[in-house]
Image (spheres, rainbow, N blue to C red):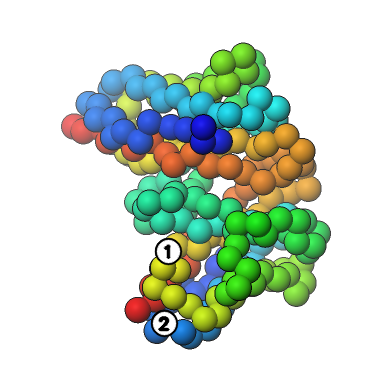
Amino acid sequence: RKEVEQDPGPFNVPEGATVAFNCTYSNSASQSFFWYRQDCRKEPKLLMSVYSSGNEDGRFTAQLNRASQYISLLIRDSKLSDSATYLCVVTPSGYSTLTFGKGTMLLVSP
Amino acid sequence: DARVTQTPRHKVTEMGQEVTMRCQPILGHNTVFWYRQTMMQGLELLAYFRNRAPLDDSGMPKDRFSAEMPDATLATLKIQPSEPRDSAVYFCASGSSQMTGPAFFGQGTRLTVV
């Protein structure tokens, strides 16, 4: 099983739609979780950290389910500018490296 | 606006040549990562440093790759000799001393080996 797995997509949604991505991780002792966003031919950028209690940042909501070892990202009221690849990132226990999933591509259309 | 700076942004070189990529981490960050990204493999960790000491370079082909931090403001990644399969985007990222904090990426070096 891969350390971090994501559905590659693409997810094609119309503007205004709500879309959700899941990501599973294999190391049950993982400590930190993040969502990054990567635009085409650009560097990954931190979108948000994921906390145990769940957290929200505007239209974005992140959830962590330790029992099932997955994290999720919910995007409400999708904008054209949300089109990007969303990378799930996990920090394994005892290390400060970041393990990336291969990303989920989102395409928001008018 | 604090950012990670990488040079060069683009590099085209012939097989067998040496390639050196440089990275200036965000001031005050003591953790530096080198990642490689290809379409097939996604983001792969090559090496990372904390307080300039290499902590993990297991993802790096040792026979041709080397990574160093001559000082706190400069990290380098060298490939010698380069091969066409090394063509990829190489990202440097830096993070704070917090063990489990996020990292912030530079714009990358797009390497093409012909």
Q: Is residue B86 visible?
A: yes
Compared with residue B41, is residue A16 higher up or lower down, i.e. above or below? Answer: above
Compared with residue B105, is residue A29 higher up or lower down, i.e. above or below? Answer: above
What label sits on residue B48 in the rendered view? Answer: none
Q: Is residue A58 visible?
A: no
On the image, numbered disc 2 is attached to which residue? Answer: B15
Mark 2 or mark 1: name the one nearer the start of the chain. Answer: 2
Q: Are marks 2 and 1 on the same chain?
A: yes
Compared with residue A43, is residue B66 higher up or lower down, i.e. above or below? Answer: below
How far across and how far down the image is residue A29, in percent? 70, 27
**Residue A69 quadrant:** top right
- Of the 4 image quadrants, the one containing the C terminus of chain B is bottom left
User: CA gap, disc 2 to disc 1?
Assistant: 14 Å
Q: Would residue A26 be found to the left or right of residue B9 on screen? A: right
Q: Would residue A79 be found to the left or right of residue A30 on screen? A: left
On the image, numbered disc 1 is attached to which residue? Answer: B88
**Residue B70 quadrant:** bottom right
Q: Would residue A29 be found to the left or right of residue B21 on screen? A: right
Residue at 42% x, 64% y is: B88
Chain letter, disc 1 residue: B
The residue under label 1 is which amino acid type? Answer: Ala
| Of labels 2 and 1, the one closer to you | 2
How many numbered marks, from 0 up? 2
How far across and how far down the image is residue B53, in percent? 79, 62
The residue under label 2 is which amino acid type? Answer: Met
Q: Would residue B10 be found to the left or right of residue B103 on screen? A: left
Chain letter, disc 2 residue: B
Residue at 51% x, 32% y is: A1
Element carrying mark 2: loop
How far across and how far down the image is residue A10, in percent? 28, 35
Element carrying mark 1: strand
How far across and how far down the image is residue B93, in percent? 60, 56
